[in-house]
Image (cartoon, helix red, strand yellow):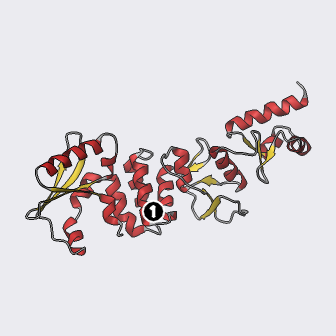
Amino acid sequence: MAPAQRREMVARELGDRHDGVVHRAELYELGLTYDQVRAETDAGRWHRVGRRTVSLVGPQLSTRASWWVAVQECGSGAVLDGVTSLLAAGLTSWEEPLVHVSVPRGTRTRPRPGVRIHHQRRMGRTTGAGTPRTVPELAVLRAAQWAVSDRQALTLLAMTVQQRLIPPARLLEAWEATERHRRRALLAQAVPLVCDGAHALGELDFARACRRRGLPEPSRQELRTTSHGVVYLDVRFDGYGVHVEINGAQHYTRLAPVADALRRNDRTLEGDLSIEIPVLGLLVDE
């Protein structure tokens, strides 16, 4: 096999593992020299996409390739974190302009366009399946901490559980082990509501929430379970003809929204004003 063919074969094997990008050190470990790598990039067959990284598939990178570049360029121990880690784990219906990477505190890094670097005192658990990243239960708590608003933090929390990226019990365990958090007060209420819907809804003091907002107190509130096993808080305001359903995060998966809509329609036809409140919405003041 000619040297040029061998170089191409070795590089392609590495590139297939990393979505078309390769760390220079890996090429050198497999016997390629600095001059050989430079010859490929000078000829335009490969492309420099960082100080440490070469693209074998052109200068335009896929999303996953850009994750590899971000991790490789940030140095040893770097992993995807926050919402980027969740996207790598399979989170859908979310757009994020930045790649979030965590590195051990003390790591020397260089700023890179489109990459937000977080220096961690404790890196926490990681997984090497695909691009190195933090485990989802840690990633979502950090994503909530780095979110631009409380609403964004709660949305990420709910979506991660709804899309089954994390078993609720594991998220609850990770939260209970969290020592410090920028949004501790908010998440102390939100995580149990997302993870333990039935119990948390039953403990919810909706009457106090009404008083705080200058509204009349409900005549009664009762925890109910649908035939599909979905739990909701059923609230009545007798004398006002108002009915309120407070729904947990599980209401927005599978066919639960359909059942909710049909149930509300029945009450509307009976003459009630039916209002739906997502439980996490109670935690966000407009």
- Residue 132 image point, x, y percent: 61, 47
Residue at position x 40%, y 49% in the image: 161
Q: Out of 125 and 194, give the one closest to the viewer.
A: 194
Q: What residue does disc 1 label?
A: 178
In this view, the residue farthest toward the top is 1
What residue is drawn where x is 45% and y is 45%? Answer: 165
Q: Secondary structure at mark 1?
A: loop
In which quadrant of the rendered image does the C terminus lie?
bottom left
Position of the N terminus, as image quadrant, is top right
Question: What percent of the width, then of the height, locates residue 167?
Answer: 40, 46
Is residue 247 in view?
Answer: yes
Q: Is residue 177 visible?
A: no
Q: Is residue 215 above or below residue 32?
A: below
For label 1, the crowd category at 10 Å Cα-Cα, with few meaning under 14, some 14 to 19 and many 20 or more, is few
- Left or right relative to 92: residue 130: right
Closer-to-camera residue (285/266): 266
Residue under the image location 89 percent in, 42 percent down: 33
- Asked if residue 1 is positioned above or below residue 172 in the image, the reply reads above
- Give residue 73's quadrant in the image: bottom right
Give residue 46's position: percent from left, percent from top.
81, 41
Specify the amino acid type for callout 1: Thr
**Residue at point 68% right, 66% down?**
106
Rendering quarter of residue 238: bottom left
Along the viewing direction, whichever of 57 and 177 lies nearer the viewer = 57
